Amino acid sequence: MSTSTLEKPPSSAPAKQKVILVEGNEAAALGVALARPDMVAVYPITPQSSLVEHVAKLIADGKMDADIVDAEGEHSVLSVLQGGALAGARTYTATCGPGLAFMFEPYFRTSGMRLPIVMSIVTRDGITPQSVWGGHQDAMTVREVGWVQVYCETVQEVLDTTIMAFKIAEHHDVMLPVNVCLDGNYLSYGTSRVELPDQAEVDAFMGDKNVNWHVALDPLRPMAVDPLTGGSSGKGPSTFVRYRKGQCKGMQNSLRVIEDVHEEWAVRFGRRYAPLVEDYRMEDAEFAIMTLGSMSGAGKDAIDEARDAGKRVGLIKLKTFSPFPVEALIKSLKNIQALGVVDRSVGFRWNCGPMYQETLGALYRLGQATGKMLPAQSFIGGLAGADITTAHFHRVIDATEALLGGATMSTEPVWLNEKD
Amino acid sequence: MYEVRFHGRGGQGAVTAAAMLAAALLEEGKYAVSIPSFGFERRGAPVVSFLRCSDKPIRQLTNIYAPDCLICVDPTLTRSVDIFAGLKPGGTLVQASNRPLAEVTLAPNVATVGLCDAIGIALQIFKKPITNTLMLGAFARTTGVVSLEALKRSLEDSDFRDAGLKQNLLALERGYNETVVHAIAQKEAA
């Protein structure tokens, strides 16, 4: 295993901020290469496949110095990386949909062991009905497993965020695995202009590698890792509670670290992303729509058109979904009078989108602080590869605006692609 | 914003063509985004892909429903697919065909047609009916949205090598030179 690759960039290192044209999956692979993981493990699954193919090619071409394990399935992929991370390696993989489902047992264990593994989820809708198309259902389904989850809007953001993810995961106040979510189809295969950061600049941004300091598979320092905790008898449940509390602390700490890392990225590379919650044309907005991931670009174009038509509407985009950035979101919500939330997945329990349902929790906190009850409507679109166009967003804007005029907040979601 | 929808059949390279055109537009300092359609692509089945270009950064990552231009890389596709759906008034069709204009399927919104016998030329160059680079040359000739030089440079920067590169450069050139552009008289608005 390569352990000290930091001092010398490969001779084929790209020129500073070279402009290239790549699909989102290749952008992710280039981001991974620039972050210099020691070990990757892969199993292909649509629409993630070309991502790990690009990683494999970078390694085969000598442009990336990492061990690659072509495992027999996703459960093994993540289990292998756990071993690598425990031995001190920076580790990476990518998956989606059924692959993520198959790796669920080690997926839960990764956050419990506080292993800073980075994994892209090239988001794919849930089966069944059978589908291999994009949607956020896979990542949403595992939002309660203690991984940090961030969603990207553009191909450039995929590249940049993939690098930042390692720094966030490995921060000693966080020590949690991170999912970089990129929308299957529209982002994974969408080809776009990106600026490729210089390797030496990325090395300086990443700093010294110190992946593993709290547990280690080291024959000279034997230690028990992930021991059986006490239950209700014997040693008692306190160890388990301490672990869980620590995970929650790491999640909360990550909010600050995500902001700090994005700020450092902006200073060093000149590209500034809202780390938690982005406000678009919210300054004097009476009402707003809320988006996640690649749909946000069309959403912003629709907002511009609605503004031109005299509507005082803005857009709130979440980049960080887990941990849920409640305080930052409340700041965005506090001056508006109505909200429409567009989800690309289904919350079966509450008959609405998952982001909508989580936002209701933030609205309760806002209500506690101000006494304001903000009406909000759930919209569900873009399932299984379906498009969410500016035309769909105009329906969202109009229906949300109707809440301003006293329309009742419905307990039914609006299904945007029902008649497409 | 200028929007192009590619129509072809699986195996003819419509998806690759959209990405190659995006690369050429990038060479010219423009912003470009290409998106393939998502379906069970297989050889011979109708496929579409999309390209947007602009002087400003492009935010929309969606399919294209009201294109400025259609590039149809297969001469028989209009028999089974309504390629004209959503075409903007005054739109452009770049069509692979060896037929005279009067025998080519058109729609009321088509104001400009570029015709290129792409299958015939491809059989000479590649010995196979692969028409995508030819039709990019035809697109450059018909619209002027991209230059032949930028298309050539982007091919030279791509994964094409040696004989494959030479053949595709020749295909671009012949597509450009052998395309006939027709202006279609538009009916006055009633």
Image: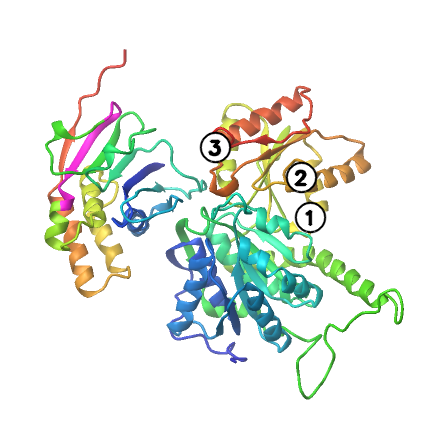
Tell me which residue sits at (42%, 59%) in the image: A50
How far apart marks 2 and 3 lie (CA) works out to: 22 Å
On what subunit does the disc labeled 2 rest?
A: A
**Residue under label 3:** A390
User: Can you give x and y, in whole percent of width and height, for residue B133 in the image?
Assistant: 21, 50
Same chain, labels 2 and 3: yes
The verdict on residue A61 being magenta is: no
Q: Would you say A409 lies left or right of B113 here?
A: right
User: Can you give x and y, in whole percent of width and height, for residue A270 in the image?
Assistant: 50, 55
How far apart marks 3 and 1 lie (CA) works out to: 27 Å
Total marks drawn? 3
On what subunit does the disc labeled 3 rest?
A: A
**Residue under label 2:** A332
**Residue under label 1:** A325
Q: Range of the magenta residues? A: B107-119
Q: Residues within 10 Å of mark 3 (few under 14, many from 20)?
A: many
User: Can you give x and y, in whole percent of width and height, for residue B113 in the image?
Assistant: 19, 32
What label does residue A182 carry, if any?
Answer: none
Q: Nearer the viewer, mark 2 or mark 1?
A: 1
Q: Secondary structure at mark 3?
A: helix
Q: Secondary structure at mark 1?
A: loop
Report if residue A333 is visible in the image.
yes
Query: Could you tell me the amino acid type at mark 1?
Result: Pro
